[in-house]
C-alpha cells in the first residue's frame, strides 16, 4: 500500500479511485475480455489497475483449479504457463478470489481442415451437414477471402468481413464460434458464405486477385467431451456449392444483391436469405502452407446505424440521401417494390456544386451497390463490401425516396472506449467527435489511411502519428499488436520495412517515420499497456531495421527518402535528409530503451549509434541553435527527439517560436511535424503559441475544417478551400485520422493527462499531470481508463480563478505541474490551504514560477485564486481575440 496515500487533509475528502480489496478490479482481459480462441503459448491475464497488495491468481477449468500463482503488489498482468492448458478448454480465472474473467483456449496446433474454393468475383454459399454430438461443440472457421458462417440457416456470431486482412502469404486467422446449445438433434447444416474480400477482390488500387485467383474457406467442427477434443466434421469434397445471388461482391467496388419476390407483409431480410440456385459439388483446393492462428484482435462488427437526414433530387430520377456525417459501412434499404426493381446506390463523401454525388476523390473505387429485387417488401443490405460516404445517390427507386427508407450501417473493429475529453467549446467537442469517428471508420481489421478511395491500406505513418491519441480514446493493445505481426510479416529479408501493412510492395519500403512504425508502435504498446511481448516479438525485426538504416547512412546522415513531411502546406520544404536522420536517431534511441526493458545486451550499442547520428544531425543541419533551413517541422523533430544540444534547447525553441509568430500563428506542418509541433511548443515554454495555432480559424488549421462542417478528419489541410473548393481529387480523403494526432496534445497539454514523456516504464505507471488552459476553452477534462487504473485531469476557469482536478489511481506515481504564478501558496487543496500542507504535500516552485508536487493516489481538487492565475486570464483576453 502506498504510504503517502494516507495524507490527512483536515476537512478535506480524498476519495480513492482504486482501493483494496481487488474485488473492485475491472477490465479483466486475456488479450480481450473473455476471449474464445486463445492461441498465445502463455496467455496473458491482465486487469486495469495496479494491485494494492499481493494477491493470488487462479485459473480453473470445470470447477477444478489448474494453476495458481502469487502476484506482487503493483502488478497488473500475469502470464499463465502454456503447458498447463489444454486446447479448446473454457477456463475461468480470478484475482484475489474476487474479480473473475474467462478465456477459452484455441486449437493450439496446426490447422487441419481442407479448403474449398469460392468464386473470384461473386459470393458463394458452401454447404455441408453433420450429425449432432454430445459435449461442447465449436466451429473453427477461416478463409482466404471473407466469410460468414450459418448454422441451420441462422447466422453465427456478429463478425463482419471475417477473418479480416492479413499478409495472406504468411498467415490468416480463424475464429471459434461455440455451437453447443445451438445444434438440433440429428442433422445440422453448416454454411459458409464466401466472397473475394481482400484476398481476391480489389485492394489498394492494384486491381483484383492480388493474393490469389480464387478465394477459399476452411472450417472444422470440434467437440470436447470426457474423452478430450475430437474433430468431428470439416470442409471437404462432400460439401456443395452454389451462387448466393451476389454476382458482384467486392470490398471496394461494391456488391450486387438479388432478392426474389416476397409475399406481402413478409419482408425479406437479406442477408439472412439466399436466392434459389443450382447446387454443385464443392471443389477442394490446396492452398500454400501458411499460419492459421486464432485472431487475437476484436472482430469487425456493426457498431451502429445512422439515419438519413434528408433527401434531394438534383435531377429527375436521381435522389441523394444525406446521412449528416461521414461514415464507414454500407446502406440498408427498406423497399416496397411494386414489381421487379433495379436500384443502384452509389456512395460518396461530398456533393458537387449542383448537388450531384462527387466521386472524383474515389479514384477507381466504384462504391456502387445494386439491388435486383422481386415484387414485395424488402430489407436489403450488402454483406461483403465497405464504403466511405456521407451521401448515397439512389437511382431506380420506386417512387419518392424518404429518409426513412434507408440508414447507414457502420462497421468497425470496435475497439473498447477507454478515454474521453470534455471541453466547453462546441467546436473542440466536434473535433474530438471527428477524431473518434475517423478512428472507428479506419479501424476495420487493420488501421487504414482512408475508407473511401481505392487505397484503404495499412499506412504505417498514419497509425504511428495517430497511435498515441488513438490509444487514449480506444483500447488498442490487441488490435495493434496483431497488426505489428502483419508489419513484421512484410519486412524484407534485408531489414527494409514496408510503408503499408499488410505489405503491398508497390507502395514502397523504407521511408523515415513510415517504416519507423515498426519501432514506434510496439513502443507505444509497451508504454500504454506494459506489453513487453509485442516488444519481444518486434525486437529482432526492429534491430534489423535500425541496422539497415545505419548501413545506408553516410557519416550518420541518412539520405532523404520519398515521403518527407507529407502534405505539409507552404513553400519551404523541410529537407528530407533532416527528417530521415532525425527519425533514425529517434528509432535508435527507442531500440536502446527496448533493449533495456527486455534485458538484452544491445542498449549501449544503440545508445552509441544515437549519439553518433544526433552529432551528425547537429553538424549537418544546425548552426548553433538555428536550423539552416528553418521550418516548423525541422524544429519540432529536432526538439521532440532530443537532437539539439541541451545548451541550445531554449534558444532553438525560441527560434521555433519566432518562426511561428512570423508565420501568423499558422501551422506549416505535414504528417511528420503535426504530431510534434504543439507538444514541443507547450513543453518548451510556448504553450501560448501552441494555443494560438490551435485556435487559428483560417487556413490551415483544425478549426478551419470544423468551420467548413467537417464530421471526420481531413487528409489534407486544404481538402476543401474557401477560394478553390475541393482540392486534388487524386489525394483528397475526408476521413483520414492522421491529423487527429492533435488529440494527444489535448489530453496531455490541455487537460493535462499523460504519462511522463521522459520515462521508459511500461503500463502508464508514471503520470505527468500538467494542465494547460487554452484561451477560448473555459474548461477541459480528460479521463482515461489506463492499464494502471482510471486517471483524470482537468481544469475549469471562473472569475475567481482556476480549479484543477485530478484523480490518481493506486500504485501509480504522479507528478502534477500547475501553471500558476506568484503567490500560489494561497491555493486550496480539497478545501485546505496548500501552505498548511507543506509536510504532507510538499510543493516546489519551478523556474517559471509554476507549482510542482507529487500527488498520492486519490482525487484532488486545487483551487488557484485569481492572483495566481491572472496571467492565464490575461492570456485569454489577449489570445481569445482572433
Ligand atoms: C495515404 C497516406 C500515406 C501517404 C504516404 C497516401 O496515399 O493516404 O495517408 O501516409 O500516401 O505516401
Image (cartoon, rainbow, N blue to C red):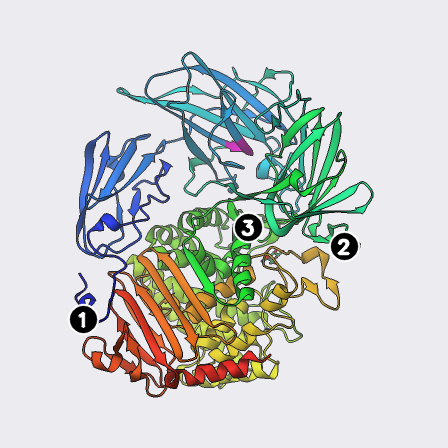
Q: Given the current orientation, which residue lies at the most extreme bottom position?
A: 822
**Pointer 3 or 1: first along the chain:** 1
> Which of the 4 image quarters holds residue 396?
top right
Secondary structure, magenta segment, majority class: strand
> Looking at the image, do the residues carrying marks 2 and 3 touch, with CB atoms under 8 Å apart?
no
> Which of the 4 image quarters holds residue 683?
bottom left
Question: Which residue is disc 1 drawn over?
Answer: 8
Q: Given the current orientation, which residue lies at the most extreme top position?
A: 186
Query: Could you say where residue 708 lies in the image, as x and y percent from the top left?
Result: 66, 63
Instruction: Examine the rendered structure and indicate whether residue 213 appears above or below residue 423.
Output: above
> Residue drawn at (44%, 50%), measured in percent from left and top?
480
- For this view, does 62 lie left or right of residue 351? left
Check disc 3: other Cα within 10 Å, few if <14, some if 14-19, many if 20+: many
* Magenta stretch encompasses residue 470: no
Check disc 2: other Cα within 10 Å, few if <14, some if 14-19, many if 20+: few
Judge by depth and name the residue closer to the eye, 790 or 119. 790
Judge by depth and name the residue closer to the eye, 817 or 506. 817
Question: Which residue is disc 2 drawn over?
Answer: 352
Question: Which residue is disc 3 drawn over?
Answer: 442
> Label 2's element?
loop
> Residue drawn at (73%, 50%), measured in percent from left and top?
359
* Magenta stretch encompasses residue 145: yes
> Label 3's element?
helix
- For this view, does 873 lie left or right of residue 458? left
- For this view, does 589 lie left or right of residue 708? left
> Looking at the image, do the residues carrying marks 2 and 1 touch, with CB atoms under 8 Å apart?
no
Checking the image for residue 865, the label placed there is: none
Q: Which residues are magenta?
A: 143-147
Amino acid at each position: 500500500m502506498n504510504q503517502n496515500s494516507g495524507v490527512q487533509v483536515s476537512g478535506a475528502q480524498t476519495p480513492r479511485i482504486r482501493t483494496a480489496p481487488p474485488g473492485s478490479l475491472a477490465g479483466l482481459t486475456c488479450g480481450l475480455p473473455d476471449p474464445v480462441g486463445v492461441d498465445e503459448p502463455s496467455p496473458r491475464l491482465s486487469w486495469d489497475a495496479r494491485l494494492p497488495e499481493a494477491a493470488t491468481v487462479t485459473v480453473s477449468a470445470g470447477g477444478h483449479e489448474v494453476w495458481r500463482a502469487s502476484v506482487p503488489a503493483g502488478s497488473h498482468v500475469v502470464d499463465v504457463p502454456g503447458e498447463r492448458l489444454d486446447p479448446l478448454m473454457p477456463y475461468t480465472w480470478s484475482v484475489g478470489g474476487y474479480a473473475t474473467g474467462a478465456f477459452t483456449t484455441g486449437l493450439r496446433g496446426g490447422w487441419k481442415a481442407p479448403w474449398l474454393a469460392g468464386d473470384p468475383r461473386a459470393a458463394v454459399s458452401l454447404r455441408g451437414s453433420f450429425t449432432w454430438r454430445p459435449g461442447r461443440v465449436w466451429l473453427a472457421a477461416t478463409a482466404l477471402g471473407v466469410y460468414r458462417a450459418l448454422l441451420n440457416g441462422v447466422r453465427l456470431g456478429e463478425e463482419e468481413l471475417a477473418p479480416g486482412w492479413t499478409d495472406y502469404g504468411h498467415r490468416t486467422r480463424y475464429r471459434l464460434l461455440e455451437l453447443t446449445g445451438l445444434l438440433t438433434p440429428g442433422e445440422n447444416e453448416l454454411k459458409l458464405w464466401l466472397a473475394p474480400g481482400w484476398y481476391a477482390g480489389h485492394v489498394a488500387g492494384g486491381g483484383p486477385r492480388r493474393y490469389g485467383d480464387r478465394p477459399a474457406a476452411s472450417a472444422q467442427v470440434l467437440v470436447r467431451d470426457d474423452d478430450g477434443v475430437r474433430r468431428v466434421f470439416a470442409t471437404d469434397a462432400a460439401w456443395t456449392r452454389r451462387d448466393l445471388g451476389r454476382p458482384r461482391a467486392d470490398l471496394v467496388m461494391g456488391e450486387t444483391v438479388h432478392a426474389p419476390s416476397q409475399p406481402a407483409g413478409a419482408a425479406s431480410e437479406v442477408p439472412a436469405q439466399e436466392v434459389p440456385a443450382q447446387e454443385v459439388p464443392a471443389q477442394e483446393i490446396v492452398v500454400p502452407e501458411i499460419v492459421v492462428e486464432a485472431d487475437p484482435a476484436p472482430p469487425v462488427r456493426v457498431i451502429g446505424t445512422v439515419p438519413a437526414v434528408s433527401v434531394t433530387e438534383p435531377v429527375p430520377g436521381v435522389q441523394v440521401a444525406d446521412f449528416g456525417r461521414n461514415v464507414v459501412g454500407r446502406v440498408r434499404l427498406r423497399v416496397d417494390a411494386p414489381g421487379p426493381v433495379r436500384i443502384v446506390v452509389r456512395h460518396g463523401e461530398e456533393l458537387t456544386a449542383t448537388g450531384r454525388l462527387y466521386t472524383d476523390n474515389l479514384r477507381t473505387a466504384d462504391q456502387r451497390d445494386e439491388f435486383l429485387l422481386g415484387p414485395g417488401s424488402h430489407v436489403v443490405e450488402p454483406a461483403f463490401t465497405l464504403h466511405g460516404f456521407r451521401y448515397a445517390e439512389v437511382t431506380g427507386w420506386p417512387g419518392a425516396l424518404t429518409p426513412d427508407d434507408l440508414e447507414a450501417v457502420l462497421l468497425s473493429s470496435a475497439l473498447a472506449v477507454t478515454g474521453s475529453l470534455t471541453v466547453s467549446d462546441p467546436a473542440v467537442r466536434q473535433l474530438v467527435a471527428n477524431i473518434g469517428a475517423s478512428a472507428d471508420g479506419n479501424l476495420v481489421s487493420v488501421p487504414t489511411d482512408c475508407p473511401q478511395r481505392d487505397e484503404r491500406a495499412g499506412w504505417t505513418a498514419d497509425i504511428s502519428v495517430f497511435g498515441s491519441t488513438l490509444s487514449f480514446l480506444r483500447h488498442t493493445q490487441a488490435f495493434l499488436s496483431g497488426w505489428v505481426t502483419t508489419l513484421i510479416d512484410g519486412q524484407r529479408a534485408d531489414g527494409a520495412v514496408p510503408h503499408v501493412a499488410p505489405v503491398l510492395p508497390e507502395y514502397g519500403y523504407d521511408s523515415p517515420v513510415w517504416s519507423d512504425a515498426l519501432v514506434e508502435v510496439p513502443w507505444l504498446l509497451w508504454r500504454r499497456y506494459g506489453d513487453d511481448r509485442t516488444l519481444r516479438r518486434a525486437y529482432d525485426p526492429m534491430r534489423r531495421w535500425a541496422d539497415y538504416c545505419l548501413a545506408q547512412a553516410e557519416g550518420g546522415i541518412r539520405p532523404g527518402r520519398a515521403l518527407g513531411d507529407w502534405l505539409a502546406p507552404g513553400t519551404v520544404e523541410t529537407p528530407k535528409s533532416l527528417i530521415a536522420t532525425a527519425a533514425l536517431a529517434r528509432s535508435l534511441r527507442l531500440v536502446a530503451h527496448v533493449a533495456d526493458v527486455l534485458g538484452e545486451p544491445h542498449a549501449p550499442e544503440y545508445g552509441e549509434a544515437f549519439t553518433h547520428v544526433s552529432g551528425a544531425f547537429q553538424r549537418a543541419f544546425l548552426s548553433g541553435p538555428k536550423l539552416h533551413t528553418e521550418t516548423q517541422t525541422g524544429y519540432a523533430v529536432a526538439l521532440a527527439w532530443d537532437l539539439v544540444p541541451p545548451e541550445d534547447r531554449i534558444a532553438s525553441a525560441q527560434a521555433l517560436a519566432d518562426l511561428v509568430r512570423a508565420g501568423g500563428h499558422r501551422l506549416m506542418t505535414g504528417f511528420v511535424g503535426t504530431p510534434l509541433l504543439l507538444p514541443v511548443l507547450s513543453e518548451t515554454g510556448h504553450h501560448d503559441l501552441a494555443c494560438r495555432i490551435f485556435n487559428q480559424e483560417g487556413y490551415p488549421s483544425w478549426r478551419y475544417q470544423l468551420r467548413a462542417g467537417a464530421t471526420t478528419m481531413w487528409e489534407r489541410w486544404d481538402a476543401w478551400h474557401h477560394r478553390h473548393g475541393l482540392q486534388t481529387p487524386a489525394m483528397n480523403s475526408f476521413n483520414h485520422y492522421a491529423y487527429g494526432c492533435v488529440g494527444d496534445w489535448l489530453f496531455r497539454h490541455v487537460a493535462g493527462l499523460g504519462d511522463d514523456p521522459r520515462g521508459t516504464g511500461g503500463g502508464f505507471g508514471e503520470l505527468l499531470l500538467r494542465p494547460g488552459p487554452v484561451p477560448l476553452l473555459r474548461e477541459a477534462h480528460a479521463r482515461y481508463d489506463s492499464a494502471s487504473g482510471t486517471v483524470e485531469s482537468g481544469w475549469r476557469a471562473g472569475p475567481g480563478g482556476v480549479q484543477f482536478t485530478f484523480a490518481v489511481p493506486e500504485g501509480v506515481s504522479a507528478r502534477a505541474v500547475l501553471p500558476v504564478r506568484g503567490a500560489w501558496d494561497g491555493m486550496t487543496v480539497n478545501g485546505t490551504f496548500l501552505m498548511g500542507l507543506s509536510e504532507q504535500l510538499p510543493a516546489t516552485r519551478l523556474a517559471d514560477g509554476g507549482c510542482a508536487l507529487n500527488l498520492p493516489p486519490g482525487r484532488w481538487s486545487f483551487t488557484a485564486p485569481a492572483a495566481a492565475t491572472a496571467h492565464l486570464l490575461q492570456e485569454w483576453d489577449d489570445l481569445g481575440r482572433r
